[in-house]
């Protein structure tokens, strides 16, 4: 038996005691670590409180002392996009605050923040932010140097989407300016008072971008300088309306010529022009010149002439019944302010068509007429529109987009009981939907932009008989008549009840309107009843200027109901000149129909 005090026993006791001490020590350390972790985690979960009178970067709190999660840049880090909370979950970019009304940035279904801007793969235009499931985000982006950075809202106060696709529509784009910046919906015109959205025939604002189903007026018509048009303005306390203003220095003294419509029974009522230029206003009495061709109606087209000592760009004029300037009176931007003759023309030929009314729906005829005008050398067609069908509106939108058509809203029916005839016995107080005022405006509108202007109706085509297009026709006529300002063309009525036995395409059966290629039999010309239309040099015209020419040079193709009763085919004159252009007209017409009409069905 060994001695308990032997060196071996002493060593064993010391070793056992040391092991116990180590076990107790590490147990205490482990317990301490658990306590510290618990305290640390609890402190991380506590809400930050705002610190009074301090500039420290604390987390702001709402009115009920709940913390608002924010976006805090991380110092010396490159990716400061989505901050995270203490538990590693991403913070919401913007969280609705209790009792607050403006919670404008949406979150995804799992309440994770949507990225503000997400580049689109393999795309150069990263302008519409998208979420992880490729849905577009609604954002608020201030525009540089712009004052109105507001997202429009719907009637239920929800933000409207920036771009909303329309079913069966190809025009779902935001228009951009020449420098690719988005255009503002309503842009004030510098130094002008015409900052309004044009309205449709029922006085509702026109849609800004996208065609709306079952709506007739889906386009904002713009002038050649891309400014919104404001066409007919009533003069307060007078039975008078102003349409447009043009500077005219062709005859001394220079004047601002306002195209208007006035009540002939109040022709002695004084009107005053208030010219605004050089940061000042000059008021002068207007000279009222009512056109002679009013056809006996109460209202007539008039030139309201304002003498002016000088004029500058960005000038405007308003019309009142008082010599005292009224700053609130709506104004017209003054056009045609230029020095000298133009060095070149934007268009060789422009066509003025008046007036599209009665919910016009002759779609096939209209397409064929526009394509024929193109083949004859026309670069621009101006249409003064009161109303048209939904199908025709789609065609108008197509041609506006192509740049061949410009629509000027002509809401004369909102102000005057117009006649649909040139005879007073048909009723109404203004000749044929205000046609003469529209045509006079169109002549002055194109005075320095188009070499020639043609004045026709929707269903008429001036057809050369010796020449292939209008360019050759006008060279011939000007050589024969060097001092003439314009040329009249006899109108030939092609009966729409008599068929030419060609070009009966089944593809066009469902397109509303008349196929002009099938009607090649015309009545004999009755000069006492047949109208005439013209091509003229607009710079030589004050109101109208007419000259005749040999009838075999050119004629107007006017497909319509017979004016001479039901004549037999033998009693009519067969004229197939239009067929010389048939192949191109058919090809181009089919292209438009396929794109616009068939795509909807």
Image (cartoon, rainbow, N blue to C red):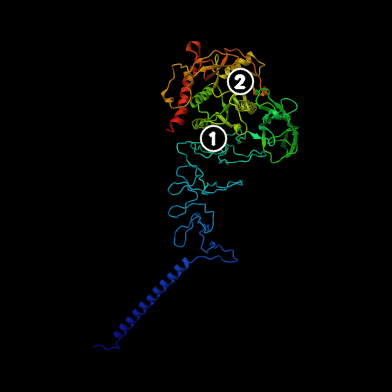
Left or right: residue 251 versus residue 31 is right
Judged from the image, the secondary structure of the residue bearing numbered disc 2 is: strand
- Is residue 339 visible in this depiction of the protein? no
Left or right: residue 272 versus residue 556 is right
- Is residue 508 visible in this depiction of the protein? yes
- Quarter of the image with the N terminus in it: bottom left
Residue 383 numbered mark, or none? none
**Along the line of sight, which residue is nearer the eye, 14 or 268?**
268
Kindly identify which residue carries mark 2: 535
Structural distance between the alpha carbons of marks 1 and 2: 30 Å
In the image, farthest residue toward the top:
570
**Along the line of sight, which residue is nearer the eye, 564 or 132?**
564
**Along the line of sight, which residue is nearer the eye, 558 or 471?**
558
- Quarter of the image with the C terminus in it: top left
Mark earlier in primary sequence (1, 2): 1
Measured as percent of width and height from the top left, residue 158 is found at 51, 49
Kindly identify which residue carries mark 1: 217
Q: In which quadrant of the rendered view does residue 595 lie?
A: top left
Name the mark nearer the viewer: 1 or 2.
1
Judged from the image, the secondary structure of the residue bearing numbered disc 1 is: loop
Q: In which quadrant of the rendered view does residue 553 lie?
A: top right
How crowded is the residue under tag 2: few (<14 C-alpha within 10 Å), some, or many (20+)? many
């Amino acid at each position: 038996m060994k001695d308990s005090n032997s060196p071996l026993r002493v060593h064993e006791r010391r070793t056992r005691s040391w092991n116990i001490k180590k076990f107790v020590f590490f147990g205490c350390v482990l317990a301490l670590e658990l306590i510290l972790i618990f305290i640390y985690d609890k402190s991380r979960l506590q809400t930050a409180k705002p610190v009074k009178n301090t500039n420290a970067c604390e987390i702001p709190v709402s009115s009920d002392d709940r913390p608002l999660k924010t976006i805090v840049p991380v110092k010396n880090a490159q990716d400061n996009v989505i901050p995270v909370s203490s538990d590693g979950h991403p913070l919401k970019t913007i969280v609705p605050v209790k009792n607050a009304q403006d919670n404008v940035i949406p979150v995804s279904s799992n309440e994770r923040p949507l990225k503000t801007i997400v580049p689109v793969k393999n795309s150069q235009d990263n302008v519409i932010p998208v979420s992880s499931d490729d849905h577009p985000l609604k954002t608020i982006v201030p525009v540089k140097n712009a004052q109105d950075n507001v997202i429009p809202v719907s009637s239920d106060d929800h933000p409207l989407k920036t771009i909303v696709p329309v079913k069966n529509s190809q025009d779902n784009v935001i228009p951009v300016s020449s420098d690719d910046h988005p255009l503002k919906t309503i842009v004030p015109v510098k130094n002008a008072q015409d900052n309004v959205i044009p309205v449709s025939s029922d006085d509702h604002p026109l849609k800004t971008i996208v065609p709306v189903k079952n709506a007739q007026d889906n386009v904002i018509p713009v002038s050649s300088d891309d400014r919104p048009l404001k066409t007919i303005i009533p003069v307060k306390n007078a039975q008078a309306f102003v349409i447009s203003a043009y500077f005219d220095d062709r005859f001394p003294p220079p004047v601002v010529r306002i195209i208007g419509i006035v009540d002939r029974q109040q022709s002695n009522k004084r009107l005053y022009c208030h010219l605004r230029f050089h940061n000042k206003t000059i008021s002068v009495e207007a000279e009222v010149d009512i056109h002679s061709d009013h056809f006996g109606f109460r209202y007539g087209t008039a030139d309201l002439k304002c003498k002016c000592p000088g004029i500058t760009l960005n000038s405007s004029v308003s019309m009142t019944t008082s010599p005292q300037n009224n700053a609130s009176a709506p104004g017209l931007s003054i056009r045609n302010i230029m020095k000298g003759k133009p060095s070149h023309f934007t268009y060789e030929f422009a066509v003025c068509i008046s007036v599209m009314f009665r919910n016009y729906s002759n779609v096939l005829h209209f397409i064929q007429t526009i394509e024929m005008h193109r083949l004859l050398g026309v670069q621009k067609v101006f249409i003064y529109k009161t109303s048209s069908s939904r199908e025709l509106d789609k065609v108008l939108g197509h041609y506006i987009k192509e740049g061949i058509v410009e629509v000027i809203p002509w809401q004369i029916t909102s102000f005057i009981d117009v006649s649909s005839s040139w005879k007073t016995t048909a009723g109404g107080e203004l000749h044929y939907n205000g046609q003469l005022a529209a045509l006079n405006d169109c002549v002055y509108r194109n005075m320095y932009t188009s070499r020639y202007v043609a004045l026709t109706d929707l269903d008429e085509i001036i057809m050369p008989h010796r020449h292939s297009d209008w360019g050759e026709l006008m060279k011939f006529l000007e050589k024969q008549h060097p001092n003439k300002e314009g040329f009249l063309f006899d109108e030939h009525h092609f009966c729409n009840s008599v068929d030419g036995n060609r070009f009966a395409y089944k593809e066009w059966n469902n397109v509303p309107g008349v196929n002009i290629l099938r009607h090649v039999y015309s009545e004999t010309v009755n000069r006492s009843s047949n109208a005439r239309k013209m091509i003229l040099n607009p710079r030589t015209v004050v109101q109208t200027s007419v000259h005749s020419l040999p009838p075999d040079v050119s004629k107007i193709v006017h497909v319509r109901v017979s004016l001479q009763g039901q004549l037999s085919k033998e009693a009519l004159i067969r004229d197939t000149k239009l067929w010389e252009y048939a192949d191109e007209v058919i090809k181009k017409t089919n292209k438009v129909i396929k794109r616009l009409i068939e795509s909807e069905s």
